[in-house]
Amino acid sequence: MRQFSKLEQRLLNEFQQGMPLTPNPYADIAKQLGIYETTVLETLRRLQTEGVVSRVGAVFRPNRIGVSTLAAISVPQSKLEESAAIINAFDEVNHNYEREHQYNLWFVVVAADEDRLQEVLSEIEASCGYAVLDLPLLNEFFIDLGFDLKWT
Amino acid sequence: MDMIKDSAFELALIEIIGKGLPLVNRPYQAIAEQLGCDEIEVIDGIKRIIMRGDLKRFGVVVRHRELGYRANGMVVWDIPDARVTEAGHCIGQYSFVTLCYQRPRRLPDWHYNLFSMIHGQDRDAVIEQVGFIVEKCGLHDIDHEILFSKRCFKQRGASYQCKPEQNSQRIATHG
């Protein structure tokens, strides 16, 4: 990982929420940092090209737009990539991670309604040949204020 | 605008702001041109979406892995139902915990009912943070496991982004 300048650190840490809803939001950010708007835009573009910034945009709460669930399957290591590819092929799947556990493939499914959600889970179960653990959200105990990056 | 037109507009807006604002000096104007409306309608539309509570955050979305937070542990806890709300609030208060959700048990296969996500610079940092939580929230008697992430096969439109593996992407497009 490369070293980040003070400006980059502040852009990454202090603007994870509260994007100004004004005609020139990047100019407003620039004003807070005491720099030019073009510097903010150039820095964000560079961080995005490097892959450090995914986007400047919205992070949605679960189950506000459609319905979603966290699902998992337990797959032999030799079948892992094949199963991951089957799961990824569904448009409704938006995360898919291998994790260290007997349940080793974890994915999030977001669908327009509960019927479609269950349909996707059934199709994944049938195509992969392993039972799917369906773990929908019951309660949220967290207000996401962004992630406090610790610079060393 | 009538109700139907209104909700179609908001859905289009939700999709656009989920993918990200353009990095230009008037991003809402650029979106307005794309949707064929006025800049103020875009700004007001986003305000309505925020007021409704649909968003967690609106701003710079960072990729933890690219920032040196290489270890990601999903910590799962088996907490007696009577204690789960208290434990959830306790775990969720720490800034290194990025998600804290209650989910159903699926017995006999799965007995954990509370899920929390921790990002750390390495595995030891995550393990230490879990120890801190156990101490601070009084969870010494609670069965739990840390499921560290290995490969990321797919991720999009979510809060904590990784770059999916080249290899798995290739598989995905053939899959």
Image (cartoon, coloured by chain):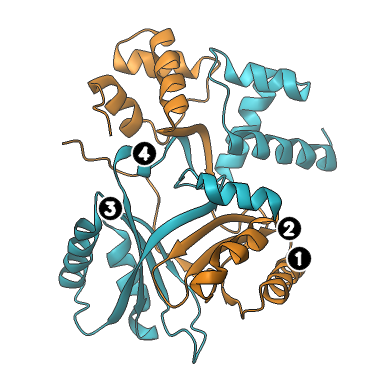
Residue B53 visible in rendering:
no
Which chain is drawn using orange? Answer: A
Q: Is residue B163 left or right of residue B91?
A: right
Host chain of mark 4: B
Q: CA distance from mark 4 to mark 3?
A: 17 Å
- From the viewer's side, name the closer residue of B20 and B126: B126
Q: CA distance from mark 3 to mark 1?
A: 34 Å
Query: Looking at numbered disc 3 in the image, what kind of residue is underneath it?
Result: Phe
* Circle 1 SS class: helix
Query: Looking at numbered disc 1 in the image, what kind of residue is underneath it?
Result: Arg
Q: Are marks 3 and 1 in contact (CB under 8 Å)?
A: no
Q: Depth-wise, is mark 4 or mark 2 nearer the camera?
A: 4
- From the viewer's side, name the closer residue of B168 and A13: B168
Q: CA distance from mark 1 to mark 4?
A: 34 Å
Which chain is drawn using cyan? Answer: B
Host chain of mark 1: A
> What crowding class fits label 1: few (fewer than 14 Cα within 10 Å), some (14-19), or many (20 or more)?
some
Precedes in sequence: disc 4 or disc 3: 4
* Circle 4 SS class: helix
Q: How many marks?
A: 4
Query: Looking at numbered disc 2 in the image, what kind of residue is underneath it?
Result: Ala
Q: CA distance from mark 1 to mark 2?
A: 7 Å
**x%, y% of residue B85?**
37, 74
Question: Which residue lies under the disc numbered 1?
Answer: A116
**Label 4 in the same subunit as label 3:** yes
Disc marking residue A112:
2
Residue shown at the point (42%, 20%) measured from the top left = A46
> What crowding class fits label 4: few (fewer than 14 Cα within 10 Å), some (14-19), or many (20 or more)?
some
**Label 1 in the same subunit as label 2:** yes
**x%, y% of residue A32?**
33, 18
Question: Which residue lies under the disc numbered 3?
Answer: B96
